[in-house]
């Protein structure tokens, strides 16, 4: 059986960088990836309209001046094919593929106490062992489908957005149905509406969507971006979510209503997540402050959608602005003014079954050629749960996290020594411009492994007290915000997963505080961890 110093699971932006760093350390590393190529999210999500919500140049790797100089982003918010090309370019540049085994899904990982290491088994039975196991399995990589009677009988094409075929799917001139109106659904809908003969949107929960403000990057801007990379990444290091948007230090309630309105109008025109994470400091903390922006956003929907009845269906009623992941859009609301687009409110008329020819709701039948499931993911813990991970005493991680994740710094869970989780639950990377936070995770893990080698340590895991304190801190921090007032994937809520408990998946203390905490822990000889 092949044996390595470290095995990495997942060749997305996190796993790729981890592979590079551990190889630099001189370790023997193997990376197993379920997909047929590098890129993770950007390999799988090939649906029409898929693109960044992060500014492109704030998302790419920061560590290599050569990569920064050689890569040109064509748009402020690049589309998926470009991001996939970028990650392929990086894989070539760093010669990553020689240590990556594609089409290799890890089925199980069992901790071997005698060897202080992990025994990994792939689907198909091949096995390998390593001292360290780094899970870079992705926060949004385990797709979920609804459970609807008759799904398997549909005779047209049906695709989950995260399992979109590599060959083009013909949508022009056809009748397309989209189930789901989250961040992905919104991107698909606004794109498909351009060419479909008829588009029927099946909506259960409307979200507050904000304009993306995308535009091409001209040559002069390109030069400017390249010259300003150090400043761009410095800014990302300073903001709460590592985006290029800094929260306004004022309260929404202390400015006069005209000023507030003017600020909201300005933010509405601002590209990217500015309106979400660059807004007044208290819109995600204070209900009265949140009401002011929620009312503003609802007004925008009513202004943009001509039919008042349709507009009312698109206005969220069950959550405040920003308490769920905000979809960014380009003419999304105007789509509902088109004669070829129809919105079906599943709360009023639920889907009863899927048939060979389409969808039947409680009061109508819709014939469809193509059915798009924009039904999201088993977020954050889903990709872990799909692997049979067994730690000390044979206990499964799935079992340990059944009532919610328990970790120290979102990087390790007690009872699972030498297993390190990038962008794992309760890690700042889950509420972040992800590459900025995952590169911090990667660098921290790399430093740890260097430290362990230097001190001839073979095993690391958190103490029970450190894990307990971190988990408590994660929940206490979340409770200071309005995020727990909404059902969302941050809360582990997915209506397609009725058995998944409502807990909390992210960490809301912010990237700078999280980074400082991780650095402090390392500086104190990995305080809170047991090393031996
Ligand atoms: C459509 C979409 C748009 C997004 N846009 C943004 C954005 O604009 N900004 C932002 O910050 N974030 C965005 N995200 C979040 C995105 O997931 C992260 O930005 C980032 O790509 C995560 O990288 P990762 O390497 O941690 O995980 P992933 O990219 O998800 O990669 C994980 C990899 O692990 C593999 N894997 C999982 N389980 C196994 C297994 N058992 N065996 C083998 N391989 C396995 C998967 O196949 C996958 O390739 C978006 C997500 C989606 C779905």
Image (cartoon, rainbow, N blue to C red):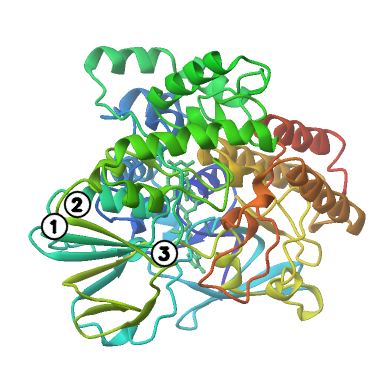
Q: Is residue 431 above or below residue 300?
A: below
Q: Is mark 2 within 8 Å of ligand 1?
A: no
How many residues crowd mark 2 within 10 Å: few (<14), some (14–19), many (20+)? many
Left-right relation of 244 to 210: right
Q: Is mark 3 within 8 Å of ligand 1?
A: no
Answer yes or no: is residue 456 visible: no
The count of marks equals 3
Marks 3 and 2, the one that precedes in the sequence: 2
Residue position marked by numbered label 2 in the rendering: 193
Q: Is residue 387 above or below residue 503?
A: below
Task: Describe the element under mark 2 as helix, strand or loop.
Answer: loop
Residue position marked by numbered label 1 in the rendering: 196
Determine the residue positioned at 57% across, 56% down: 488
**Along the line of sight, the residue nearer the viewer: 110 or 398:** 398
Marks 3 and 1, the one that precedes in the sequence: 1
Instruction: Say the numbered circle drawn on residue 375.
Output: 3
Q: Position of residue 392 (x, y in %)?
A: 80, 73
How many residues crowd mark 1 within 10 Å: few (<14), some (14–19), many (20+)? some
Instruction: Please identify the quarter of the rendering in which residue 218 is found.
Output: top left
């Amino acid at each position: 059986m092949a044996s390595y110093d470290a095995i990495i699971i997942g060749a997305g932006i996190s796993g790729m960088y981890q592979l590079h760093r551990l190889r630099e350390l001189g370790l023997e590393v193997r990376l197993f990836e379920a997909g047929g190529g590098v890129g993770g999210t950007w390999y799988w999500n090939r649906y029409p309209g898929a693109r960044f919500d992060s500014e492109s140049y704030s998302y790419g790797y920061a560590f290599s001046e050569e990569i920064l100089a050689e890569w040109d982003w064509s748009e402020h918010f690049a589309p998926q094919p470009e991001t996939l090309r970028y990650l392929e370019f990086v894989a070539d540049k760093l010669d990553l593929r020689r240590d990556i085994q594609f089409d290799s899904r890890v089925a199980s990982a069992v901790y071997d106490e005698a060897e202080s290491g992990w025994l990994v088994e792939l689907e198909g039975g091949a096995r390998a062992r390593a001292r360290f196991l780094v899970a870079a399995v992705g926060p949004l990589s385990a797709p979920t489908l609804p459970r609807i009677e008759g799904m398997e009988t549909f005779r047209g094409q049906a695709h989950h957005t995260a399992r979109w075929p590599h060959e083009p799917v013909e949508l022009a001139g056809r009748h397309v149905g989209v189930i789901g109106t989250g961040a992905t659904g919104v991107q698909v809908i606004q794109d498909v509406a351009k060419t479909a003969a008829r588009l029927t949107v099946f909506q259960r929960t409307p979200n507050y969507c904000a304009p993306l403000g995308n535009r091409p990057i001209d040559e002069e801007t390109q030069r400017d971006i390249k010259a300003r990379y150090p400043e761009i990444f410095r800014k990302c290091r300073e903001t709460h979510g590592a985006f290029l948007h800094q929260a306004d230090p004022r309260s929404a309630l202390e400015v006069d209503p005209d000023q507030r309105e003017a600020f909201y109008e300005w933010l509405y025109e601002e590209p990217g997540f500015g309106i979400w994470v660059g807004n007044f400091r208290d819109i995600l903390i204070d209900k009265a402050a949140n009401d002011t922006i929620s009312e503003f956003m609802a007004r925008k929907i009513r202004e943009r959608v001509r039919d008042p009845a349709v507009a009312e269906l698109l206005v969220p009623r069950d959550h405040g602005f920003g308490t769920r992941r905000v979809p960014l859009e380009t003419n999304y609301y105007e789509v509902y003014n088109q004669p070829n687009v129809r919105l079906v409110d599943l709360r009023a008329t639920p889907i009863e079954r899927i048939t060979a020819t389409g969808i039947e709701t409680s009061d109508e039948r819709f014939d469809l050629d193509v059915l798009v499931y924009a039904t999201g993911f088993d977020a954050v813990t889903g990709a872990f749960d799909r692997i049979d991970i067994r730690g000390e005493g044979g206990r499964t991680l799935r079992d340990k996290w059944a009532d919610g994740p328990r970790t120290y710094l979102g990087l390790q869970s007690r009872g699972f020594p030498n297993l390190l989780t990038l962008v794992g639950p309760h890690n700042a990377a889950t509420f972040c411009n992800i590459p900025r936070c995952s590169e911090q995770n990667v660098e921290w893990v790399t430093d740890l492994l260097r430290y362990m080698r230097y001190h001839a340590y073979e095993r690391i895991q958190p103490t029970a007290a450190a894990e307990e304190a971190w988990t408590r801190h994660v929940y206490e921090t979340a409770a200071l915000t309005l995020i727990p007032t909404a059902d969302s994937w941050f809360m582990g809520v997915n209506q397609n997963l009725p058995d998944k408990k409502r807990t909390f998946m992210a960490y809301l203390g912010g990237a700078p505080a999280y980074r400082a905490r991780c650095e402090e822990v390392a500086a104190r000889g990995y305080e809170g961890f047991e090393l031996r």
